[in-house]
Image (spheres, rainbow, N blue to C red):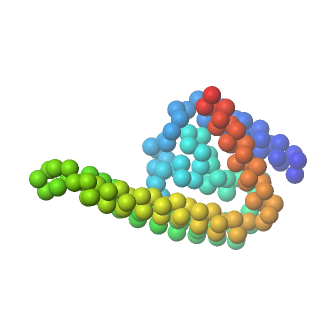
Amino acid sequence: MKRTLMALAAGLVLVAAAGCAQPYGRNPEMMGAGGPAGWHGVHGMGMGWGMMWDDPALGLTQEQRAGIAGVQAEFRRRQSALMEKMHQDDGHSTAPEGLFDEPAARKAYDAMAELQRQLFENSLEERKQIDRLLTPQQREQIQMQMRQLQQLQQMCRG
């Protein structure tokens, strides 16, 4: 186990070196039906908790992989629908004559805030569902990996 964790840490250092060389922010190439990869990971690093399922050190069973894939597919479907709705609602509130309409602006803001809340709630639910599929040891290993990624991210920022 210690050997595996050391190998993982070494791999994370290599990922961090590559990540630090990349511009900070969301990578347009990582946009997909589920939205920006940043929802699943560490912005600018190219690897986050959503990508950790491919790590052989976790020792996921076929059943766990299938369960996680199902949870993620449902998450992407739900997020995609919300994102599409957000893009349809441009948030600009003007009266028919083109004048500013404060009540309409507030209503548009409230609608967008509700969509953002739903996106957040969906991501929490996805994480809870996946956590239920993992063993305590797997959850602990992922938490350790995330702490390491957050530390590396801080180093990259400055």
* Image coords of residue 150 (percent x, y): 67, 42
* Image coords of residue 3 (percent x, y): 87, 45
How many marks are shown on the rendered structure? 0
Can residue 80 be seen here? The reply is: no
- Residue extending farthest right: 2
Residue at 56% across / 61% down in the picture?
Answer: 123
Can residue 73 be seen here? The reply is: yes
* Horizontal relation, residue 76 to residue 8: left or right: left
* Horizontal relation, residue 62 to residue 43: left or right: right
* Horizontal relation, residue 44 to residue 152: left or right: left
Query: Residue 82 appears in which quarter of the rendering?
Result: bottom left
Most foreground residue, 7 or 121: 121
Most foreground residue, 47 or 114: 114
* Image coords of residue 13 (percent x, y): 72, 36
Most foreground residue, 55 or 48: 48
- Residue extending farthest front: 102
Residue at 14% across / 50% down in the picture?
Answer: 98
Residue at 56% across / 39% down in the picture?
Answer: 44
Tell me the quadrant of the picture where the C terminus can be found. Answer: top right
